[in-house]
Image (cartoon, grey):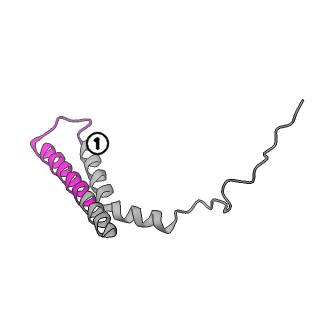
């Protein structure tokens, strides 16, 4: 019976310490408005799970959806400007 052993060195030279890198933290900070808007939408949807939807609830959900769409638009526009500016 043959033993199986790794013949190659480890793929990553630096061990993973479990902490996000500076680039990952910057990306999270850039996406934070979208994340918060999505959390607000989720909160509004959770509130109506066990009761009939009132006009106020519908308005709250509609506004939360609009905030999510606006945050996505702003994030997309910011990414487009950065790419266009970096390519010039």
- Quadrant of residue 9 within the rendered picture: bottom right
Label 1 CA crowd tier, 10 Å (few <14, some 14–19, many 20+): few
The total number of labels drawn is: 1
| Residue most extreme to the right | 1
x and y, in percent, of residue 34 in the image: 29, 56
Q: Is residue 1 above or below residue 57?
A: above
Which quadrant would residue 70 be assigned to in this image?
A: bottom left
44 or 87: nearer the viewer: 87
Tell me which residue sits at (20%, 48%) in the image.
Answer: 65
Q: Toward the viewer: 17 or 82?
A: 82
Q: Position of residue 62 (x, y in %)?
A: 15, 46
In the rendered image, the residue lying farthest to the left is: 55
> Mark 1 = which residue?
46
User: Residue 45 at x, y = what percent?
Assistant: 25, 42
Q: Is residue 32 left or right of residue 11?
A: left
- Nearest to the observer: residue 48 or residue 67: 67
The N terminus: image quadrant: top right
Residue lying at the far top of the rendered structure: 1
Q: Residue at x 78, y 45 (%)?
A: 6
- Per the image, is 54 magenta? yes
- Taking the image as shown, residue 78 lies to the left or right of residue 2, namely left
Quadrant location of the C terminus in the rendered image: bottom left
Specify start and end residues of the magenta stretch as a single range.
48-75
């Amino acid at each position: 019976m043959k033993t199986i052993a790794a013949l190659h060195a480890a793929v990553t030279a630096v061990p993973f310490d479990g902490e996000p890198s500076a680039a990952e933290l910057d990306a999270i900070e850039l996406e934070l408005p979208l994340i918060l808007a999505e959390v607000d939408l989720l909160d509004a949807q959770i509130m109506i799970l066990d009761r009939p939807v009132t006009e106020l609830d519908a308005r709250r959900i509609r506004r939360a959806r609009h905030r999510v769409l606006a945050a996505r638009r702003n994030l997309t526009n910011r990414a487009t400007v950065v790419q266009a500016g970096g390519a010039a």
